Image (cartoon, rainbow, N blue to C red):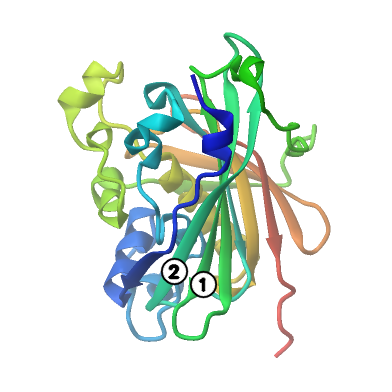
Amino acid sequence: MIDYEKTKAWRSGPVRHAYTARDTILYALGVGFAADPLSAEDLRFVYEKDLQAVPTMAAVLASPGFWMRDRKELGIDYLKLVHGEQGVTIHSPLPAAATLIGESRVTRIVDKGEGKGAVMHVEKALTDEADGRLVATVEMVLFLRGDGGFSRNGGGDEAAAAVPATPDAAAELSIELPTRADAAVLYRLSGDLNPLHVDPAVASKAGFPRPILHGLATYGNACRGILAQFCGHDASRMKSMRARLTSPVYPGETLMLDCWRLGSEEIAFRASVKERGVQVLANGRAILAPALVR
């Protein structure tokens, strides 16, 4: 059973992550950029000349690793852990190459009740080692399916405000986003080496017919679509992006990104798999900076 006090007090300490243009390009390829190598717009994310980083790459930088498994004294049933939501807030454009310091902490643990699991929020602050400026704040929400009922031993936080649902109306715009057949093989080079995403035998043992795409790669693909349709491929206009991860994608499937404009600077979105009609991202929100008048 999860130990609330010890888990709430957990801090990663500073995690130093030096990355290069090569890492930035690999991430962009993993989330679908440059499927058309002649696309001048996509080239801005995969060519070192005037290279810009995909904002959602902040989610994978300076990660503390799978600490829930390594810190057994916290009592987290990591085998029943599910990545439920992801959010990234960009305070300063993510550099194409830099050394960042990541410091992660648990900000909230909510008991949903015996047999109903718990919800844990983990926040990561990314600062630039060179000048100390805050580059991004990253939040992931984890569903701890095996840890409901922990509050009978003390502790527990109030639930966070619900993430707004997408509008109950037809989408204003639907964006078709093909994923690469080798998307998971590419994306894992950005740090998540879980064999579930590359080894057919491991995927089969987990109940999947073949390896699945990383949830954060699906999230990154949605960012690709929003940058293309609403930001003119200008990564500096993405200020924040959040979504609920609801179902896995198989590499090679096509994502349908449904979008609604909520004013000039906010986009609501959700995503589903075209081939299977399964929703894979829900309750999405992206906040954009205004376009510069040139």
Evaluate if marks 2 and 1 touch, with contact meaning CB atoms under 8 Å apart.
yes
- Residue at the image position 52 percent from the left and 36 percent from the top: 6
Q: Label 1's element? A: strand
Residue to which mark 1 is pinned: 127
Q: Relative to residue 97, is residue 167 drawn left or right?
A: right
Q: Amino acid at mark 2?
A: Ile
Q: Relative to residue 292, is residue 184 drawn left or right?
A: left
In space, the residues marked 2 and 1 are separated at their CA atoms by: 5 Å
- Picture coordinates of residue 141 (x, y %)? 57, 38
Decide: is 62 above or below 284.
below
- Residue at the image position 41 percent from the left and 56 percent from the top: 60
Residue to which mark 2 is pinned: 101
Q: Relative to residue 128, is residue 39 drawn left or right?
A: left
Decide: is 129 above or below 163.
below
Name the N-terminal-most of marks 2 and 1.
2
- Picture coordinates of residue 55 (x, y %)? 52, 64
User: Can the viewer see residue 234?
Assistant: no
| Residue 29, quarter of the rendered image | bottom left
- Residue at the image position 38 percent from the left and 62 percent from the top: 28
- Residue at the image position 65 percent from the left and 59 percent from the top: 240
- Picture coordinates of residue 253 (x, y %)? 38, 37
Q: Amino acid at mark 1?
A: Thr
